[in-house]
Every structure is written in structure tokens, then in C-alpha cells.
Image: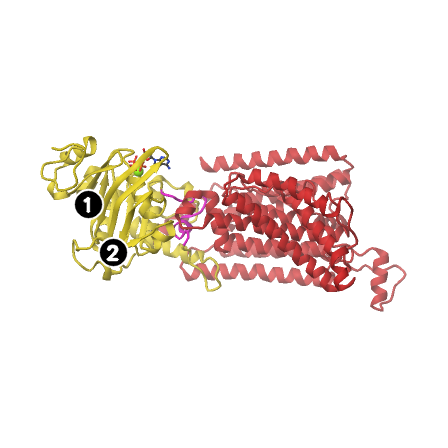
Chain colours: A red, B yellow
């Protein structure tokens, strides 16, 4: 065995002489080439827009806004990855967002205050819990029809797209429901819904420590079993790059200051001096962005470290093999739709908190952006392939395109055309890449 | 690689009570009678070969034992006990492991994940212990196919023979009592085939009962103790290998012609 395992790296070494430095970096660090490509694409898009917009794209203000705009789509895209990997699709997420958001808004603005009084924390807590349960229930219902009644998910969720939109309308007879509880609004990440500068640095430092801890744990585990280790320089490079990225993002976020009047209030509340030239107090990470990061970490854990995630991938790779392997495939599919529903409820909460209202049109077309984010992020519609970090990047790419074009003053129809073209090109590139791998 | 619970198979050779009995199994797909009232049995430490032309119903028959398909009627007895096998989990719980003709691998995940599919090793936190699974796979493969070294790529990128090795590894790793091998060497080269033959003998010596489906009549004569011949969904006969010649078995497979002196239920034609 030792002979055989030693042979592989030796063969590697022979090949390496011909590889470029970039390829060598990539193979040694074992970074997925597709992620690598996506990061490159994102860099190109950002720098391109920066020039096209005359230097307004890569500003802390725009990037801060971009982070908030990406959050809800990214949260849902992590669930869509699991759904698509298991060879299904969920077209109903936009309508579901509308119905669940509307239900939460009604509870908060009209129903629960009668019982607990306005401003009681129970109002927003109960409405949030009910929303999440509703999302899970709708997901379970649709998933059960897909898994047990064997109706294709495309059809089930196409039906859901119509049904839940109708429900959203009927719940409020087309009215706009407002306002939301003031604590609940913090979830939306307005200028008050942020964690502040110090906490942002703290989050970044914890993130950094997490990256290092994961790398060390990985090395230990491989050492314990006598596996070939990544070269230490590659591990250090990954650690440094990861930490620089995390701390850099924190620095960019923190360089976006509070608007003047808000900063003045903030200073007054804390009895601080208000100097002539004003104060620059960082807003810090927006709550929905923090939520997105938490969801992404949790979902990545579910997808890669839990049996459930493994089964989702196995089902996508070969449903018969999964069944013969003793996996409860149908129940697993139901669970993917439930997870999707819960994430939709979270996204719905963020949306209505941000708008401080729910309208019947809430979430319209969201399904397309969510699916686009997952697919741009490397999720294969044929099933079996996809990743959570990819979906987050995909959401960021799609949102960057949109916000860049807004900054450029491109009108809405052209924006749609560009996003549509990019979606197709991204998938074409991805499948071309995959074909090259197979030959 | 596998320790066998010998208490169930401690009688050497043929015990009075079979390890597995399939009684009067019937399976139909729509109007097609794939298996029509077939009975076979298997003892611990014995290899029973199932042979027959394409579409004879061999795969369908053993899939009722491995839980992949439910029989329309008939009974399965294991150690004399009537059992119900509704799904692959039930079969595994009864100690039945299967190498499927189609291999049944999840193409998009690596060898260790396939071998432990449905029976993953977990850390004490309840998360997947991929390093332990990879380690176990390395050890397993060192015995089964030392030339197998790719433990990280999706199995879709492996050769047919390597994929077959993965399927075999999965079946033998989990202390089976009863092993079903549906064309286990179909994709293997001569050296690898010899290795699998060796493995089959080892497993037999360890007391497992093995159903071996093979089109290679030499393989069958080399390994099997008894041969059950199927033709168009029916059992022609079960014969002891030592009582028949190769030509006689071929005649049974092709024409359902019983050899003189074979003691079994009558076939479609009397000799
Ligand atoms: N899932 C199915 N649906 C319909 N018919 C089937 C199905 N599986 C098998 N059959 C039919 O049942 C019969 C027996 O098939 P089976 O696969 O058991 O044959 P086999 O003896 O294993 O053949 P081979 O040597 O080619 O593997 C064939 O006529 C086949 O067409
Ligand atoms: Mg067959």
C-alpha cells in the first residue's frame, strides 16, 4: 500500500516541471479549479465595472450595499444547491417568499399585537417562528409530492409558484402590510441594522482563527492516518490568503461610515463630543450579511460533513445506487425541500424587515435569481454536482453585474439581457470545462 | 478484511439446514414472467452458481434476496427462519451483501464514500469521518487490488475494472454471511479476475454462502459446488458440479436438456 501511495506524488512531480506557476499553486493548494475560475471572473467583473463607472464600483459604499443586496439570494441559493444536486428543482421559492413574508407581516402588524400589545418582543419572535415552520411545512408538502407521489419537481413547484403567489394575495387581499416591529427591522440591515465596527473586526478575527484551526485539524487528521500531506507552504499560503481576504473584507466594510445625521445621533446617545469636521463611525457588517455568512457556514457543514449531505450527493449521482445502498432516498428528498423552505422563510424575514412592509408581489422572480446563482456557482442541473461556496460566489457575481449596470445607468431591460446572457455563457463554459475533464 | 461469525456456519461443508432458501419465487414485470416459481438454496461455506442465458431471470431472482425488488410470491428463509425483505436495508441487516451487475455506484463521489454508502463511519460528533473511511479503504484495497490507488476522484473517472473493485470491496467489508455476486468479474482483466477468484475461495473457506452469477462456464466449474441452471424464468435443475460435465451444463443452459442421473425437479424435457 505504501508503495502504491508513494507512486502517485512521484508521478505528479514529473508532470510539474511543465506546469505554470499558477497551475502549480492550484494543484498544491487543492483548490477547486472552478472556484478559482469564478474568483477570477468576479475580479474581472469588479475591475471592469470600476473603470466603466468612473471609479464608483470599488468604493466601500458600493461594496457595502452589494453585500446587503446579495444576502437574501445567497441565503436561498445555498438551499437550492441541495435541491438541484438531488436532481430536483424548486421554482416556487419566490412565491413562497411572498406567502411566508406576508404571513409573518400580518402576524406582526395585525394579529399578534392584539394579544400581546404592540412592541412586545413576543410579537416578532412568534411571527418569525411561525414563518420558519410555515416554510418548512410548505417545503415538506412539496417534497412529499415529489418523492412519494413521483410527480416531477418541475411540475410540483411550478404549481407551487402559482399557488403560493395566490396565497400571498389572498392573505392580505392585495394590501401592503406595514409596519414591522422595530427590533425585527434590525434583521433587514438598514443603517441601524449593523453590528458596528468593533464587532466586525471581532467577527473577522474569529473567522481567521477558524480558518487556521481547520487547516491545523486537517493536517493532524491526515498525519494520524499517515496520508500524504499537502506541502506546508501550500497550507500556509491558504491560511494567509484566507486571513488576508477575511480581514480585508472587514476593513472594506468598516471603511464605510455612518451617514452624518445617524453618526450625530449615535454620538449624542453615547455622550461623545461632536467635532466640527464630524466623526467617521463605521457602520460595520450588516445583520443580513452576518446571517448569510452563518447560513453559508451551516449549509456547507450540512452538505459536506453530515450524512444527509452525502446522501443528497449520492442520490444526485445515481438514485438507484443510493437506494440499493440502503439510503432512505425519498425521505432525503423531502428533507432537501424542507431545508429550502426554511431558508426561504429566513430570506422572507430579511426582506420584510428591510422593506419594513410586505407586499403581495414580494419575491417575484426571486426563483430565477436563486437558480441562476446556484448554476453560475457551478451546480449542475443534471444533479450530483454543486457547492455552497460556489453558490455564494454565484449570487455575488449575479448581483455585481446588476448593481454595476445600475451604477452605469444601464436601463432595466438591458440589465435583464446581460444577466440572461451571462447565465448561459457561464453554464456553457462550465460544461465545456467538465467535458475536457472527462476526456 | 472480514471476520466472519462462524457460529452460524460451524458445520463443515453441507449442514442439514441451508443458510438461505428461496422457495417458489415468482416475479413478473407487467406481462413478462421474469421468474416463475424458482426454488434454490445455499449452505454456509458453499458456492452455488446461477447460470443461464441472457434474460433467464438470474438477476431478477437474486434481487428479491438483496431487497432491490419484492417478489410477487414465494418465501425466503434464512437459517430456517421465514424472513421478509422489503428493502436493501433489511437484506443488509440479515447479513446479505450484493455485488450488482450494474455495480450500483454513485458516480460523483469517491471510492471511500461509495464503499461506506449508507454505513458511513462517523466521528464522535456525529459528522462524517472521511479520513477514517479513506484509511479503511486503503487497507481494504491493499488486499483486494493493490494497484488501486485513487481514493479521492469520483468513481466516474475510474476504469471499469477499478469500479468493479470498489463494488466488490463494498460487499466484502461488512462481515456478510451471504454474498451475492452478479457477474463480479465481467469487467476485470486476467490478473484481477484471478485475484477475485482467490478472494471468493477465501470467503467460502471463511464460511460464507455465496451465490455466484457468471457467464464464464470455466469460472463456474472452477469455483462452484453446485450449479443452478435457469431458462426463461424457470429453474431447469440444480446439479452437483462433480456429477456433470461442461457440455451437459451447456446443454441445460441452451436447451434445458437434463443430463442423465441428475436429481432435481423435472425440466421442460425428459431425457
Ligand atoms: N425492471 C424491469 N422491468 C421490466 N422487465 C424487466 C426488468 N428487469 C428485468 N426484466 C425482464 O426480466 C427478464 C429477466 O431479466 P434478468 O435481468 O433477471 O436476466 P438475467 O438472467 O440476469 O440476464 P443477463 O445474463 O443478461 O444479466 C428479462 O426478460 C427482462 O427483460
Ligand atoms: Mg443479470
Span shown in magenta: B103-118
Image mark 1: chain = B
Q: In the figure, residue A174 lies in which quadrant? A: top right
Q: Nearer the viewer, residue B176 or B271?
A: B271
Q: Residue A255, how many percent across, how many down?
A: 75, 55
Q: Nearer the viewer, residue A360 or B51?
A: A360
User: Is the residue indicated by label 1 positioned so its CB lies within 8 Å of ligand 1?
Assistant: no
Q: Which residue is mark 2?
A: B79
Q: Residue B201's mark?
A: none
Q: Residue B3, how many percent across, how many down?
A: 28, 59
Neighbour class for label 1 at 10 Å: few (<14), some, many (≥20)?
A: many
Q: Is residue A32 left or right of residue A73?
A: left
Using the numbered discs, state the Cα–Cα distance from disc 1 to disc 2 in whole angstroms.
23 Å
Q: In the figure, residue A84 lies in which quadrant? A: top right
State the SS at label 1.
helix
Decide which of tag 1 and tag 2 comes sooner along the chain. 2
Residue pictured at 50% horizontal, 61% vertical: A217
Q: Which residue is mark 1?
A: B223
Q: Nearer the viewer, mark 1 or mark 2?
A: 2
Quarter of the render that holds ligand 2: top left
Q: Residue B199, how many percent across, how many down?
A: 25, 50
Q: Is residue B117 magenta?
A: yes
Q: Is residue B188 visible?
A: no
Image mark 2: chain = B
Furthest-front residue in view?
B73
Q: Nearer the viewer, residue A115 or B183?
A: A115
Amino acid at each position: 500500500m505504501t508503495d502504491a501511495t508513494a507512486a502517485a506524488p512521484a508521478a505528479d512531480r514529473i508532470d510539474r516541471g511543465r506546469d505554470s506557476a499558477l497551475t502549480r499553486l492550484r494543484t498544491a493548494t487543492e483548490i477547486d479549479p472552478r472556484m478559482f475560475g469564478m474568483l477570477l471572473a468576479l475580479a474581472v467583473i469588479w475591475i471592469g465595472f470600476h473603470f466603466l463607472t468612473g471609479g464608483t464600483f470599488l468604493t466601500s459604499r458600493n461594496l457595502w450595499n452589494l453585500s446587503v443586496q446579495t444576502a437574501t439570494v445567497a441565503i436561498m441559493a445555498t438551499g437550492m444547491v441541495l435541491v438541484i444536486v438531488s436532481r430536483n428543482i424548486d421554482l416556487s421559492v419566490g412565491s413562497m417568499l411572498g406567502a411566508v413574508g406576508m404571513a409573518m407581516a400580518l402576524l406582526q402588524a395585525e394579529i399578534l399585537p392584539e394579544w400581546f400589545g404592540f412592541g412586545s418582543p413576543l410579537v416578532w419572535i412568534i411571527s418569525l417562528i411561525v414563518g420558519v415552520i410555515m416554510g418548512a411545512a410548505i417545503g415538506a408538502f412539496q417534497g412529499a409530492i415529489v418523492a412519494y407521489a413521483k410527480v416531477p419537481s418541475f411540475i410540483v413547484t411550478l404549481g407551487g409558484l402559482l399557488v403560493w403567489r395566490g396565497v400571498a394575495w389572498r392573505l392580505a387581499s392585495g394590501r401592503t402590510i406595514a409596519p414591522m416591529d422595530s427590533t425585527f427591522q434590525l434583521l433587514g440591515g438598514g443603517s441601524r441594522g449593523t453590528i458596528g465596527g468593533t464587532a466586525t473586526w471581532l467577527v473577522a478575527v474569529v473567522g481567521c482563527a477558524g480558518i487556521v484551526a481547520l487547516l491545523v485539524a486537517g493536517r493532524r487528521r491526515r498525519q494520524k492516518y499517515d496520508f500524504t500531506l499537502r506541502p506546508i507552504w501550500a497550507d500556509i499560503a491558504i491560511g494567509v490568503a484566507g486571513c488576508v481576504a477575511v480581514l480585508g473584507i472587514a476593513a472594506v466594510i468598516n471603511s464605510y461610515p455612518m451617514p452624518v445625521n445617524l453618526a450625530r445621533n449615535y454620538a449624542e446617545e453615547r455622550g461623545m463630543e461632536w467635532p466640527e469636521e464630524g466623526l467617521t463611525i463605521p457602520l460595520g457588517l450588516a445583520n443580513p450579511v452576518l446571517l448569510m455568512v452563518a447560513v453559508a457556514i451551516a449549509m456547507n457543514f450540512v452538505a459536506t460533513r453530515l450524512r444527509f449531505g452525502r446522501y443528497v450527493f449520492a442520490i444526485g449521482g445515481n438514485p438507484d445506487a443510493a437506494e440499493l445502498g440502503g439510503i432512505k432516498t425519498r425521505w432525503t428528498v423531502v428533507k432537501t425541500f424542507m431545508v429550502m423552505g426554511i431558508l426561504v422563510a429566513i430570506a422572507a424575514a430579511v426582506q420584510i424587515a428591510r422593506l419594513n412592509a410586505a407586499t403581495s408581489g414580494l419575491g417575484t422572480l426571486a426563483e430565477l435569481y436563486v437558480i441562476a446563482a446556484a448554476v453560475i456557482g457551478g451546480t449542475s442541473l443534471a444533479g450530483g454536482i454543486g457547492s455552497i461556496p460556489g453558490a455564494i460566489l454565484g449570487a455575488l457575481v449575479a448581483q455585481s453585474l446588476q448593481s454595476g449596470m445600475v451604477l452605469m445607468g444601464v436601463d432595466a431591460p438591458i440589465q435583464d439581457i446581460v444577466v440572461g446572457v451571462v447565465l448561459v455563457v457561464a453554464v456553457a463554459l462550465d460544461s465545456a470545462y467538465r467535458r475536457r475533464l472527462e476526456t | 478484511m472480514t471476520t466472519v461469525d462462524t457460529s452460524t456456519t460451524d458445520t463443515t461443508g453441507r449442514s442439514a439446514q441451508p443458510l438461505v432458501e428461496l422457495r417458489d419465487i415468482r416475479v413478473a414485470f407487467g406481462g413478462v414472467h421474469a421468474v416463475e416459481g424458482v426454488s434454490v438454496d445455499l449452505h454456509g461455506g458453499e458456492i452455488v452458481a446461477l447460470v443461464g442465458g441472457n434474460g433467464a431471470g438470474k438477476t431478477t431472482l437474486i434481487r428479491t434476496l438483496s431487497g432491490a425488488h419484492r417478489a410477487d410470491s414465494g418465501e425466503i428463509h434464512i437459517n430456517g427462519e421465514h424472513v421478509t425483505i422489503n428493502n436493501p436495508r433489511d437484506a443488509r441487516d440479515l447479513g446479505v451483501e450484493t455485488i450488482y451487475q450494474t455495480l450500483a455506484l454513485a458516480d460523483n463521489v469517491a471510492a471511500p464514500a461509495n464503499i461506506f454508502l449508507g454505513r458511513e463511519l462517523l466521528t464522535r460528533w456525529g459528522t462524517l469521518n472521511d479520513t477514517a473511511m479513506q484509511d479503511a479503504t486503503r487497507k481494504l484495497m491493499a488486499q483486494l487490488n493493490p494497484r488501486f490507488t485513487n481514493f479521492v476522484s469520483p468513481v466516474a473517472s475510474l476504469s471499469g475494472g477499478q469500479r468493479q473493485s470498489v463494488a466488490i470491496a463494498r460487499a466484502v467489508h461488512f462481515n456478510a454471511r451471504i454474498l451475492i455476486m452478479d457477474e463480479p468479474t465481467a469487467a476485470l482483466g486476467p490478473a484481477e479476475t484471478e485475484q477475485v477468484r482467490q478472494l471468493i475461495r477465501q470467503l467460502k473457506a471463511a464460511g460464507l454462502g455465496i451465490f455466484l452469477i457468471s457467464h464464464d462456464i470455466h469460472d463456474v466449474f472452477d469455483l462452484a459446488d453446485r450449479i443452478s441452471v435457469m431458462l426463461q424464468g424457470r429453474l431447469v435443475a440444480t446439479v452437483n458440479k462433480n456429477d456433470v460435465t461442461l457440455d451437459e451444463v451447456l446443454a441445460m443452459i441452451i436447451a434445458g436438456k437434463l443430463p442423465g442421473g441428475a436429481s432435481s425437479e423435472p425440466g421442460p424435457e425428459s431425457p
